[in-house]
Every structure is written in structure tokens, then in C-alpha cells.
Amino acid sequence: MKKCIINPIPGTMRVDFAKPSAEGEKIRVTLSRGTDTGAKNSLPALWVKHGFTASRLSDWWNVEVVVTAPDGTEHHRYNPQTARNHKIDFAWVLPATEENAQKIFDEIARRAGIVWEVAA
């Protein structure tokens, strides 16, 4: 289960997970929609040019995950768009759809050791 708060900023969604991580952390995820400007040097154009993506994305989800530990300290963890080497994991730069937002939430939950309860 997750609690969803839609921000008044168009294209932005903030979600506070109702269940803590396996480490007892509170998790807040912010998804913001990135859009292609159409310029020849836009991010999506450069991603294709340098082989990071197969096609030029018209929009995509930017992901920020903030984790609050039981002692109150905040960290950035469980973000599927951040690879172990702190570079972008383009496998998780997905078009900005509701379905892809759910895939991102599910992956963050998996990395945090959270098991979603499926409604019958």
C-alpha cells in the first residue's frame, strides 16, 4: 500500500509509502515529468546520439527517492534510475505513463524490501 499526494505542479507526483522499508525507513518518492523540447541538443536527442536510449523520448519520469532512517537522518536510496556507479541507469528512464510510474514504485518497494498487499 502507498499513500499518494499529487502536487499542484503539473506533471509531478509525490508518494509517501505507507509501509516502512525492511530497515524501518520512511520512503518518499517524487516523480516529475521531463519533456523533450525538440531542440537538436535536448537530453533525449543526446541520449539517442550517444547510444543510451534506442529512440528519442517525448517525455519520461525523473525519479527522486528520499529515505528517512529511524534516527531521523535522510538519504537517497533505492532509486532504480541510479546505477551502482552513480550514473544513470537508462533501463529505468521510462516514458511518463501511469503504468511506468507503477513499475517504478514497485521496483523501489522491491529494493526496499517492502511487500505490497494485493487487494482481492
Image (tube, grey):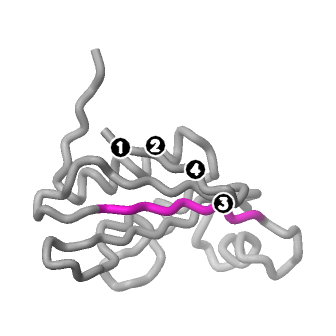
Q: Residues within 10 Å of mark 3 (few under 14, many from 20)?
A: some
Mark seen at residue 71:
none
Q: Secondary structure at mark 3?
A: strand
Give the x, y percent position of residue 92: 47, 60
Mark 4 sits on what residue? 6
Residue of label 3:
33
Q: Nearer the viewer, residue 1 or 47?
A: 1
Q: Mark 4 or mark 3: name the one nearer the start of the chain.
A: 4
Q: Secondary structure at mark 2?
A: helix
Q: Which residue is mark 1?
A: 2
Closer to the eye: label 1 or 2: 1
| x 43%, y 61%: residue | 29
Between 1 and 113, the residue placed more toward the observer is 1
Q: Residues within 10 Å of mark 4 (few under 14, many from 20)?
A: some
> Please, what is the three-letter code of the amino acid marked with disc 1?
Lys
Give the mark nearest the N terminus, 3 or 2: 3
Residue drawn at 13 percent across, 62 percent down: 24
Tell me: residue 104, above or below residue 90: above
- Report whether residue 68 is seen: yes
Tell me where the magenta segment starts and ends, as one range: 27-35
